[in-house]
Amino acid sequence: MSPVKKAEHLPICNRIGVLRAERRMSRAQLAELVGVNVQSIGSLERGDNYPSLDLAFRICDVFRLPVEAVFSRHEFSAMSTQLYRSNNGGPS
């Protein structure tokens, strides 16, 4: 049995907007690459809708990242925080 009750909905947070910006990619470009309309990408970025598992994998393929680097059940901390933590607690 699932640890989540049937009526309980957990959020799905994502880094789609940040990843797009890092790659200087428009919503329209990402939408075309994954086969959805541009409004769908905007809705995902705002958290208004959640992707299907298939769409989540297609988005991750575009960014060449694992699912857990793009989507999470918890808010993401800044990527720089995670990088500095992995470099023994501080920037070089």
Image (cartoon, rainbow, N blue to C red):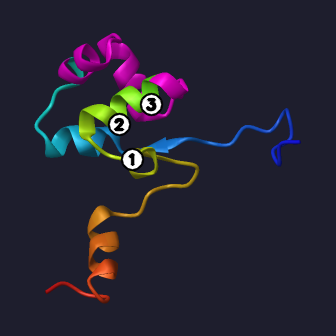
Q: Are marks 1 and 2 in contact (CB under 8 Å)?
A: yes
Residue 59 sits in which quadrant? top left
Give the answer, above or below, for where 28 lies relative to 9: above
Does residue 36 appear to the left or right of 52 in the view shown?
left
Q: Is residue 7 left or right of residue 52?
A: right
Q: Label 1 vs label 2: CA separation?
A: 6 Å
Chain part drawn in magenta: 29-54
Residue at coordinates 17% horizontally, 26% vertically from top-left?
26
* Residue 17 in magenta stretch: no
Q: Secondary structure at mark 3?
A: helix
Residue type, mark 3 in image: Ala
Q: Which residue is mark 2?
A: 60
Judging by the rendered image, the residue that carries numbered circle 1 is: 66
Q: Residue at x 50, y 55 (%)?
A: 75
Q: Which residue is mark 3?
A: 56
The residue lying at 41 percent from left, 63 percent from top is 77
Q: Amino acid at mark 2?
A: Cys
State the image coordinates of residue 47 (x, y, percent, origin top left).
Answer: 49, 34
Q: Which quadrant is home to the N terminus?
A: top right
Dot 2 falls on a residue whose secondary structure is: helix
